Image (cartoon, grey):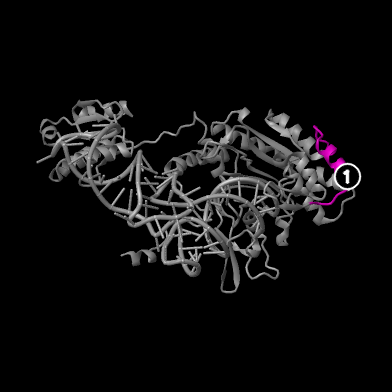
Amino acid sequence: MTQDKKNKPSKELPLGFVDRQEKELLVRDFIISNIKEVMIRYGFQYLETPSFEYTDSIGKFLPDKDRPDEGVFSFQDEKKWLSLRYDLTAPLARYVAKNYLEIPKPFKRYQLGTVWRNEKPGPGRFREFLQFDADFVGTQSLQADAELCVMISEILEKCGLSKEEYSIKISSRKITEELFKKINLNNNEQKLIVLRALDKIDRLGWTGVKQLLGEGRKDKSGDFTKGANLNASNIETIETELKKKSAETNDLLEIFKIFKDYNFSNFEFDPSIIRGLEYYTGPIFEVNLKFDVKNNKGQVIQFGSIGGGGRYDNLVNNFGNYDAPATGISIGLDRLVYALMQKKEFKIKQSKPVVICVFNKNLMKEYINLQNILRGSGISAEIYPGESKLKKQMEYANKIKAPAVILYGEDEIKSGKPTLRDLISGKEKSISIKELVNEIKKII
RNA sequence: GCAGCAGUAGCUCAGUUGGUUAGAGCACUAGUUUGUGGAACUAGGGGUCGGUGGUUCGAAUCCACCCUGCUGUACCA
C-alpha cells in the first residue's frame, strides 16, 4: 500500500492557480450582473474571443527564443506557437483588424474573460484571473475616455462602494512626453526605465523613485536595481513637473470639461500615475480603492489598483491595414471580489436548501411529493442525499447551513403534518403541508 | 529572475548539547441517545517530520542540492 502511495496523482495545484469557492463566486456573480446591466445601458456590445491566440497576434514575438515564455503560457501546434491570452485588449485589436469592414465605427464592446499570466503570483494576484474590459475602437473623441471613467464609477457604486471608498486617478502620456522633451531625453530604453521608476511612486515614495532615476536602488533584501542614470538637475525637473497639482495638457483639460458636463467629480488628477505599458498614447486612468484591505492574517496590505486603462491609438494599426484609435479600461474582477468581501456590511444572501430527512426509504414517494411542493413554490429544498441515521442527517443540514429541516416519518405522514425544525432557533412545529410553505418563507 | 526567511497530521503549532513505537489543540470518524444538529464525555483513524543524497552505531534535529510557500525586488503587454 505504501508503495502505491508514491504513484498517486498530486493533489497540489500549479503555482498561482486556485480553487474558488461559492462564497467568492457569489460575490463575483453579483459584480458581473451589475457590470452587464450597466454595459447594456451604456450601449456596449458583448463579445467573446478564444482563450488561445496565435502568439504573434497578441504581441508576443519569438525573435531567437525557443519558447515565447516571457509572461505567457504557450505551446507549439504543428509549426505555429499558440499562447493563452494575457489580457483582453490584444485580442480585441486582433478582432477589430480581422472584422474591420463589418463592425460599426466606432465599435464599443465589452468582454468578460479569464486571462493567464506566467509570472510570480502575489497576495490577491494569481496566474489565472477574470478580467472585465470595455473599449471604444475607432474614435479619437475624448468623450469616449471620459465616459469610460463615468461608467466605471457607476459600476463600482452599484457594487456598493461609496464615493469615499474609491477614486479614479487620471493623467496623460502627453505629460511624460513633454517632460522628456524638456530634459532632452531621446534614448528609448532610458525613457522606459524612467517610466517604470515613476510608476513606483505610491510604493517607494519620491526618495526611492529618485534613486531609480539616478544610479539605482538597493531594496530591503539587499537586491540592487539599476537606475536610469539621469543627472541631478534632470531628476529635479521631473520631480517639480510631476508634483504639479493641475493638468496643463489639452487632452486632460478637455476631459475635465466633459466630466463637468456629466456632473462627474469623483476623479483626481495625478501626474504620477504611469501604468507601465508602452502602448498608451494619451489619457491614462487607474482605479484605486481607498479602504484598508487585509490578508488572511489580518494585516493591512498594499493593495494597489483594481484596474485601469487608457488611450492606445496605434494598437489596431499594428496589424497593418486599418487605423483605429482606441481607448479602454479593464478591471481585475478577482481583486475587486477580494476587496469587497472584506467590507463588513457586504453580505450576499445564500439560499441554502431546506433538508427533508429520510426515515424510511419505502416512503420515498411521500418525500418526493413534499420536495416537489416546496421546489414548486420557489423554495430551495432537498431530500437528504444519502442513507444515514437521523443524527447524521441533522449534522449534514447543520454543516450546509440549511435554514430548517423537515421531519416526516410514519407518524407525521399518517397525520399529514410534518414537523418543521428551525435550525437557527432550534424550535419545532407540527404543521399541515398547506401551511408549510408559508412557515418556511418566514424562516428564510 | 534576484535576495531574505520558512516547510512536522486536513488546519494552527510544540518537539536542541542527534537516542527507543513523533506530540497537542481544532477538525474528522464511531459511540454515550437504533426519531433530532450546534455543548460535553469516551474511543478511534490520520504523519516515509517537503524531497533526494550525505555525515553518524543512530537524523524531524547536522551538511549539500532540489522542490514548495511567504516577504521584498525586478518584469508585467
* Whether residue A443 is situated above or below residue A37 in the rendered picture: above
Q: Nearer the viewer, residue A100 or B69?
A: B69
Quadrant hosting residue A153: top right
Q: Which residue is disc 1 drawn over?
A: A232
Query: Is-magenta flag for residue A177?
Result: no
Image coords of residue B76 (percent x, y): 67, 52
Q: Nearer the viewer, residue A175 or A32?
A: A175
Query: Is-magenta flag for residue A245?
Result: yes
Secondary structure beneath disc 1? Answer: helix
Going 60% across and 32% down the picture, which residue do you hit? A291
Image coords of residue B52 (percent x, y): 47, 67
Query: In the visual, does A192 lie left or right of A64?
Result: right
Packing grade of label 1 (10 A; few <14, some 14-19, many >=20) is few
Query: In the visual, does A237 lie left or right of A306?
Result: right
Residue bounds of the magenta highlight = A227-249
Image coords of residue A46 (percent x, y): 56, 48
